[in-house]
Amino acid sequence: MALSWAGAPLVSSVRLLGRVLRAPQPATPALSYCTATTSGRIQINGASLHYQRTGCGDHAVLLLPGVLGCSQTDFGPQLKCLNKELFTVIGWDPRGYGLSIPPTRDYPPDFFSRDAKDAVDLMQALDFKRFSLLGWSDGGITALIAAGSYPSLINKLVVWGANAYVTEEDLVLYNAVKDVTNWSPKMKKPLEDLYGKEYFANTFSAWVKAMAHFTSKSDGNICRQLLPLIGCPTLIIHGMKDPMVPSFHPQFLHQQVKNSSISPSTLY
Protein backbone atom coordinates (compact mmCIF):
# COMPACT_ATOMS: atom_id res chain seq x y z
CA MET A 1 0.00 0.00 0.00
CA ALA A 2 1.66 3.18 -1.14
CA LEU A 3 1.61 6.27 1.00
CA SER A 4 -0.65 9.06 -0.18
CA TRP A 5 0.34 12.69 -0.22
CA ALA A 6 -0.35 15.77 -2.29
CA GLY A 7 0.48 15.14 -5.92
CA ALA A 8 1.62 11.57 -5.39
CA PRO A 9 0.07 10.01 -8.54
CA LEU A 10 2.34 11.24 -11.32
CA VAL A 11 1.03 13.72 -13.85
CA SER A 12 2.31 11.44 -16.60
CA SER A 13 -0.19 8.80 -15.48
CA VAL A 14 -2.91 10.92 -17.07
CA ARG A 15 -1.61 10.03 -20.52
CA LEU A 16 -1.47 6.32 -19.70
CA LEU A 17 -4.93 6.29 -18.16
CA GLY A 18 -6.33 8.11 -21.17
CA ARG A 19 -4.92 5.46 -23.49
CA VAL A 20 -6.27 2.63 -21.35
CA LEU A 21 -9.75 4.15 -21.40
CA ARG A 22 -9.35 4.93 -25.14
CA ALA A 23 -9.64 8.67 -24.94
CA PRO A 24 -9.68 10.71 -28.18
CA GLN A 25 -8.00 14.09 -28.54
CA PRO A 26 -8.74 16.72 -25.87
CA ALA A 27 -12.10 18.48 -25.98
CA THR A 28 -12.48 21.34 -28.41
CA PRO A 29 -13.12 24.93 -27.24
CA ALA A 30 -16.74 24.53 -28.32
CA LEU A 31 -17.13 22.00 -25.52
CA SER A 32 -15.53 24.17 -22.83
CA TYR A 33 -18.88 24.32 -21.01
CA CYS A 34 -18.20 20.89 -19.56
CA THR A 35 -14.63 21.53 -18.42
CA ALA A 36 -15.49 23.23 -15.12
CA THR A 37 -15.01 21.28 -11.89
CA THR A 38 -17.88 21.47 -9.42
CA SER A 39 -18.17 20.20 -5.86
CA GLY A 40 -21.05 18.51 -4.11
CA ARG A 41 -22.00 16.62 -0.98
CA ILE A 42 -24.37 13.69 -0.62
CA GLN A 43 -25.55 11.43 2.20
CA ILE A 44 -24.36 7.86 1.62
CA ASN A 45 -24.75 5.09 4.20
CA GLY A 46 -24.95 7.53 7.10
CA ALA A 47 -21.98 9.69 6.03
CA SER A 48 -21.92 13.06 4.27
CA LEU A 49 -19.51 12.45 1.39
CA HIS A 50 -17.82 15.22 -0.57
CA TYR A 51 -17.09 14.77 -4.27
CA GLN A 52 -15.86 16.73 -7.26
CA ARG A 53 -17.25 16.38 -10.76
CA THR A 54 -16.01 17.44 -14.19
CA GLY A 55 -16.57 16.50 -17.82
CA CYS A 56 -19.69 15.59 -19.77
CA GLY A 57 -18.76 12.32 -21.48
CA ASP A 58 -20.73 9.10 -21.53
CA HIS A 59 -17.91 7.16 -19.85
CA ALA A 60 -18.15 7.75 -16.09
CA VAL A 61 -14.94 7.35 -14.09
CA LEU A 62 -14.52 7.35 -10.30
CA LEU A 63 -11.15 8.32 -8.80
CA LEU A 64 -10.32 6.58 -5.51
CA PRO A 65 -7.57 8.15 -3.35
CA GLY A 66 -5.10 6.55 -0.98
CA VAL A 67 -4.76 6.64 2.80
CA LEU A 68 -5.48 10.15 4.10
CA GLY A 69 -5.96 11.30 0.52
CA CYS A 70 -8.87 13.06 -1.11
CA SER A 71 -9.89 13.89 -4.66
CA GLN A 72 -7.94 17.13 -4.90
CA THR A 73 -4.72 16.05 -3.14
CA ASP A 74 -4.39 12.76 -5.02
CA PHE A 75 -6.07 13.44 -8.35
CA GLY A 76 -5.67 17.10 -9.24
CA PRO A 77 -3.95 16.27 -12.59
CA GLN A 78 -6.62 13.73 -13.54
CA LEU A 79 -9.47 16.10 -12.70
CA LYS A 80 -7.80 18.72 -14.84
CA CYS A 81 -6.49 16.71 -17.77
CA LEU A 82 -8.60 13.60 -18.43
CA ASN A 83 -10.59 14.10 -21.62
CA LYS A 84 -13.78 15.87 -20.63
CA GLU A 85 -15.60 15.21 -23.87
CA LEU A 86 -15.29 11.46 -23.46
CA PHE A 87 -15.40 11.17 -19.67
CA THR A 88 -17.46 12.34 -16.76
CA VAL A 89 -14.93 12.25 -13.92
CA ILE A 90 -15.88 11.97 -10.25
CA GLY A 91 -13.32 12.39 -7.50
CA TRP A 92 -14.49 11.54 -4.00
CA ASP A 93 -13.29 11.93 -0.42
CA PRO A 94 -13.88 8.70 1.54
CA ARG A 95 -15.52 9.12 4.93
CA GLY A 96 -13.16 10.76 7.41
CA TYR A 97 -10.82 12.06 4.69
CA GLY A 98 -10.59 15.41 2.95
CA LEU A 99 -13.86 17.31 3.14
CA SER A 100 -15.85 14.20 4.15
CA ILE A 101 -15.31 15.08 7.83
CA PRO A 102 -17.29 14.47 9.95
CA PRO A 103 -17.26 11.59 10.61
CA THR A 104 -13.83 11.12 12.09
CA ARG A 105 -11.97 8.43 10.18
CA ASP A 106 -11.96 5.02 11.82
CA TYR A 107 -10.75 1.58 10.74
CA PRO A 108 -13.10 -1.25 11.67
CA PRO A 109 -12.13 -4.68 10.33
CA ASP A 110 -14.29 -4.16 7.23
CA PHE A 111 -13.20 -0.60 6.43
CA PHE A 112 -12.09 -1.44 2.89
CA SER A 113 -15.43 -3.11 2.14
CA ARG A 114 -17.25 -0.17 3.73
CA ASP A 115 -15.35 2.23 1.46
CA ALA A 116 -16.14 0.07 -1.56
CA LYS A 117 -19.86 0.11 -0.79
CA ASP A 118 -19.75 3.87 -0.15
CA ALA A 119 -18.01 4.41 -3.50
CA VAL A 120 -20.44 2.28 -5.49
CA ASP A 121 -23.48 3.73 -3.72
CA LEU A 122 -22.18 7.24 -4.38
CA MET A 123 -21.97 6.57 -8.10
CA GLN A 124 -25.41 4.97 -8.14
CA ALA A 125 -26.84 7.97 -6.26
CA LEU A 126 -25.34 10.21 -8.95
CA ASP A 127 -27.24 8.11 -11.55
CA PHE A 128 -24.27 6.31 -13.08
CA LYS A 129 -25.41 2.78 -13.84
CA ARG A 130 -21.97 1.60 -15.00
CA PHE A 131 -18.62 3.24 -14.46
CA SER A 132 -14.87 2.70 -14.43
CA LEU A 133 -12.57 2.87 -11.40
CA LEU A 134 -9.10 4.40 -11.08
CA GLY A 135 -7.74 3.44 -7.66
CA TRP A 136 -4.44 4.42 -6.06
CA SER A 137 -2.98 2.85 -2.88
CA ASP A 138 -5.86 2.21 -0.44
CA GLY A 139 -8.12 3.40 -3.23
CA GLY A 140 -6.72 0.62 -5.40
CA ILE A 141 -7.71 -1.96 -2.80
CA THR A 142 -11.14 -0.35 -2.51
CA ALA A 143 -11.47 -0.49 -6.30
CA LEU A 144 -10.53 -4.18 -6.40
CA ILE A 145 -13.16 -4.97 -3.78
CA ALA A 146 -15.79 -2.93 -5.60
CA ALA A 147 -15.01 -4.62 -8.93
CA GLY A 148 -15.15 -8.07 -7.36
CA SER A 149 -18.26 -7.39 -5.30
CA TYR A 150 -20.25 -5.53 -7.96
CA PRO A 151 -18.90 -6.86 -11.29
CA SER A 152 -21.98 -5.93 -13.32
CA LEU A 153 -21.47 -2.24 -12.48
CA ILE A 154 -17.80 -1.84 -13.38
CA ASN A 155 -16.75 -1.01 -16.92
CA LYS A 156 -12.95 -0.90 -16.60
CA LEU A 157 -10.46 -0.92 -13.75
CA VAL A 158 -7.03 0.66 -13.26
CA VAL A 159 -5.12 0.19 -9.98
CA TRP A 160 -1.66 1.15 -8.81
CA GLY A 161 0.13 0.83 -5.47
CA ALA A 162 -2.43 -1.79 -4.40
CA ASN A 163 -2.23 -5.14 -2.62
CA ALA A 164 -4.70 -7.91 -1.79
CA TYR A 165 -3.02 -9.13 1.41
CA VAL A 166 -0.56 -7.99 4.05
CA THR A 167 2.71 -9.73 4.93
CA GLU A 168 5.22 -9.31 7.74
CA GLU A 169 7.48 -7.65 5.19
CA ASP A 170 4.76 -5.08 4.54
CA LEU A 171 4.38 -4.40 8.27
CA VAL A 172 8.08 -3.58 8.55
CA LEU A 173 7.60 -0.92 5.85
CA TYR A 174 4.46 0.48 7.49
CA ASN A 175 5.98 0.66 10.97
CA ALA A 176 9.06 2.40 9.62
CA VAL A 177 6.89 5.40 8.67
CA LYS A 178 4.29 5.18 11.47
CA ASP A 179 5.76 8.18 13.31
CA VAL A 180 4.85 11.03 10.98
CA THR A 181 7.14 13.46 12.83
CA ASN A 182 10.00 11.73 11.00
CA TRP A 183 8.53 12.43 7.56
CA SER A 184 10.14 15.07 5.41
CA PRO A 185 8.47 18.51 5.45
CA LYS A 186 7.53 18.05 1.78
CA MET A 187 5.67 14.85 2.62
CA LYS A 188 3.85 15.89 5.77
CA LYS A 189 3.08 19.59 5.31
CA PRO A 190 0.20 19.14 2.80
CA LEU A 191 -1.48 16.65 5.14
CA GLU A 192 -0.88 18.77 8.23
CA ASP A 193 -2.37 21.75 6.38
CA LEU A 194 -5.39 19.67 5.41
CA TYR A 195 -6.06 17.90 8.70
CA GLY A 196 -4.06 19.56 11.44
CA LYS A 197 -1.10 17.85 13.09
CA GLU A 198 -3.07 15.85 15.65
CA TYR A 199 -5.71 14.41 13.32
CA PHE A 200 -3.07 13.56 10.71
CA ALA A 201 -0.76 11.79 13.17
CA ASN A 202 -3.50 9.92 15.00
CA THR A 203 -5.25 8.81 11.83
CA PHE A 204 -2.12 7.50 10.17
CA SER A 205 -1.13 5.63 13.33
CA ALA A 206 -4.59 4.05 13.44
CA TRP A 207 -4.22 3.03 9.80
CA VAL A 208 -0.93 1.23 10.52
CA LYS A 209 -2.58 -0.66 13.38
CA ALA A 210 -5.50 -1.59 11.13
CA MET A 211 -3.16 -2.94 8.47
CA ALA A 212 -1.30 -4.99 11.09
CA HIS A 213 -4.62 -6.58 12.02
CA PHE A 214 -4.82 -8.24 8.60
CA THR A 215 -1.77 -10.38 9.40
CA SER A 216 -3.83 -12.16 12.05
CA LYS A 217 -5.97 -13.59 9.26
CA SER A 218 -5.10 -16.54 7.07
CA ASP A 219 -2.56 -15.40 4.45
CA GLY A 220 -2.94 -11.80 5.59
CA ASN A 221 -6.08 -11.64 3.50
CA ILE A 222 -7.72 -8.36 2.52
CA CYS A 223 -9.55 -9.34 -0.67
CA ARG A 224 -7.85 -12.39 -2.23
CA GLN A 225 -11.16 -14.20 -2.68
CA LEU A 226 -12.65 -11.37 -4.76
CA LEU A 227 -9.92 -11.11 -7.38
CA PRO A 228 -11.13 -14.05 -9.55
CA LEU A 229 -14.60 -12.46 -9.57
CA ILE A 230 -13.38 -9.31 -11.33
CA GLY A 231 -14.57 -9.59 -14.91
CA CYS A 232 -13.80 -6.19 -16.40
CA PRO A 233 -10.62 -5.29 -18.31
CA THR A 234 -8.05 -4.37 -15.66
CA LEU A 235 -4.72 -2.56 -15.84
CA ILE A 236 -2.28 -3.02 -12.96
CA ILE A 237 0.41 -0.35 -12.64
CA HIS A 238 3.40 -0.52 -10.34
CA GLY A 239 6.36 1.81 -10.00
CA MET A 240 9.81 0.25 -9.98
CA LYS A 241 10.80 2.52 -7.06
CA ASP A 242 7.63 2.14 -4.99
CA PRO A 243 8.94 2.20 -1.38
CA MET A 244 5.83 0.72 0.23
CA VAL A 245 4.54 -2.03 -2.08
CA PRO A 246 6.89 -4.94 -2.88
CA SER A 247 6.70 -6.17 -6.46
CA PHE A 248 5.14 -9.53 -5.55
CA HIS A 249 1.85 -7.73 -4.89
CA PRO A 250 1.13 -6.54 -8.45
CA GLN A 251 2.34 -9.87 -9.79
CA PHE A 252 -0.20 -11.64 -7.56
CA LEU A 253 -2.98 -9.33 -8.73
CA HIS A 254 -2.09 -10.06 -12.35
CA GLN A 255 -2.18 -13.81 -11.72
CA GLN A 256 -5.57 -13.69 -9.99
CA VAL A 257 -7.50 -11.14 -12.08
CA LYS A 258 -8.25 -13.05 -15.24
CA ASN A 259 -8.79 -10.16 -17.64
CA SER A 260 -5.80 -8.11 -16.51
CA SER A 261 -2.66 -6.67 -17.99
CA ILE A 262 0.32 -5.26 -16.16
CA SER A 263 2.38 -2.18 -16.91
CA PRO A 264 5.80 -2.85 -18.42
CA SER A 265 7.57 -1.11 -15.52
CA THR A 266 6.28 -3.87 -13.22
CA LEU A 267 8.01 -6.60 -15.20
CA TYR A 268 11.53 -6.31 -13.84
Image (cartoon, rainbow, N blue to C red):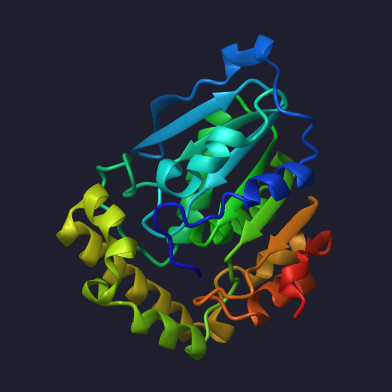
Quarter of the rendering containing residue 29: top right
Q: Position of residue 259 (x, y in %)?
A: 84, 59
Q: Is residue 208 left or right of residue 74?
A: left
Which residue is at 34% across, 49% downward?
Answer: 97
Q: Residue at x 57, y 49 (%)?
A: 11
Place of residue 162 in the rendered image (x, y in percent of width and height, measured from the top left): 58, 66
Residue lying at 77% horizontally and 76% vertically, measured from the top left: 267
Q: Nearer the viewer, residue 103 or 265?
A: 265
How far across and down, in percent of the image, does residue 217 sit?
50, 82
Q: Nearer the viewer, residue 202 or 76?
A: 76
The spot of residue 178 in percent (x, y) is 30, 77
Image position of 199 (left or right of 111): left
Q: Quadrant of the C terminus?
A: bottom right
Residue 126 seen in this snapshot:
no
**Residue 74 as seen in the image, left or right of residue 196:** right
Q: Is residue 214 above or below residue 144?
A: below
Indicate whether 155 appears above or below 251.
Answer: above
Residue furthest to the left: 198
- Dividing the picture into quadrants, the one containing residue 129 is top right
Is 21 above or below relative to 181? above
Residue 55 in view here: yes
Q: How many marks?
A: 0
Residue at (70%, 34%) from the top-left corner?
A: 130
